[in-house]
Amino acid sequence: MKKMDIKETFDNEAKEYDFTSRAVNIYFDEALEQLVKNIKTNDKNIAILDVCCGTGILTEKVAKSFPNANFTGVDFSTGMVDVAKARMKNYDCKFFISDLLDDKKMAKLSGDFDLIVSSFGIHNIHGMSEKQRALKNVMQHLKTGGQYITCDILKGINKKEIEHFYNFQKQWLLKTYSAEATQNWLDLLAEEDDPVALKDNFDLLENAGLKDLKLYWKKEFLAIWSGTKK
Ligand SMILES: C[S@@+](CC[C@H](N)C(=O)[O-])C[C@H]1O[C@@H](n2cnc3c(N)ncnc32)[C@H](O)[C@@H]1O
């Protein structure tokens, strides 16, 4: 699936996203809560960037722990960001509409961030070199010593694991959807998602200027990992 189609998919899905995110993404709320718990800074007056912020579900969860922080959400879907704007109206939060792959625009994102968070986003960017470019465009805005922490889906490391993950995803969808709707979701996800293994995710972050890469939490094909800007 092409990048523009992914933007359109999220624009169209935006109003139902708060429901579908839980029905489709395994352990969605638990993972976001674990992500917030593993934020390392105790400093409350910080600048925080949420990458691929979508409708701002993670932004809001982080804001509850850091109510005095200032927030920026970056995403290319105006439909998703419109929902996030309403959700974050009582916080110091602004939004930057950009494709992470737009080098020039991403360079203009204002602010040096103490903390960058991201959930369920980078797997939507297809190809290792594109993910690398996106992450470099993001990390130029992270302060030295600042933490990047993310939760995202992983690709299985062999055929058996890939099959197991597919079946687990199917069973998760069947809790909410009919057999036919589940198959439609599986077909959509196969086109929309391009997850990579944890090792590849670590390589991407190292090449984007991070060190001290660490896995914090993992359930099935969902994980939380983090690194610090060199
Ligand atoms: C699955 S949603 C996750 C949203 C939110 N972080 C959450 O956990 O609910 C993925 C988001 O990434 C955004 N996205 C995907 N590719 C992008 C890109 N290349 N540039 C900017 N945003 C992108 C989509 O618009 C969408 O809002």
Image: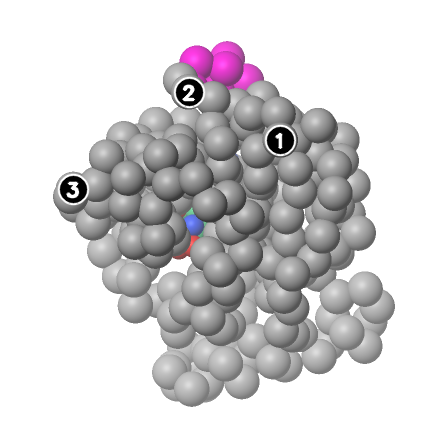
Residue 27 part of the magenta-drawn span = no
- Amino acid marked by disc 2: Gly
Residue under the image location 46 percent in, 79 percent down: 173
Vertical placement of residue 33 versus 68, above or below: below
Q: Secondary structure at mark 3?
A: loop
Residue under the image location 23 percent in, 35 percent down: 92
Q: Main secondary structure of the magenta part?
A: helix
Q: Which mark is residue 145?
A: 1
Measured as percent of width and height from the top left, residue 222 is found at 60, 66
Closer to the chain start, of discs 3 and 2, is 3
Q: Dots 1 and 3: beta carbons under 8 Å? A: no
Please name whichever residue, 56 or 215, is drawn nearer the observer in this view of the structure.
215
Closer to the chain start, of discs 2 and 1, is 2
What segment is highlighted magenta in the picture? 103-109
Q: Which mark is residue 30?
A: none
Q: Can you tell which quarter of the image residue 88 is in?
A: top left
Please name whichever residue, 176 or 141, is drawn nearer the observer in this view of the structure.
141
Q: Is residue 227 visible?
A: yes
Measured as percent of width and height from the top left, residue 19 is found at 30, 68
Q: Which residue is mark 2?
A: 111
Number of other residues with Cα within 10 Å of mark 3, as a class: few under 14, some 14 to 19, many 20 or more: few
| Disc 2 residue lies near ligand 1 with CB under 8 A | no
Image side of residue 131 versus residue 67, left or right:
right
Instruction: Report the Cα–Cα distance between label 3 and label 2.
Output: 20 Å
Q: Secondary structure at mark 2?
A: loop
Q: Which residue is mark 3?
A: 89
Q: Secondary structure at mark 1?
A: strand
- Amino acid marked by disc 1: Gly
Q: Which quarter is ligand 1 in? A: top left
Q: Residue furthest front?
A: 42
Vertical placement of residue 161 versus 80, above or below: below
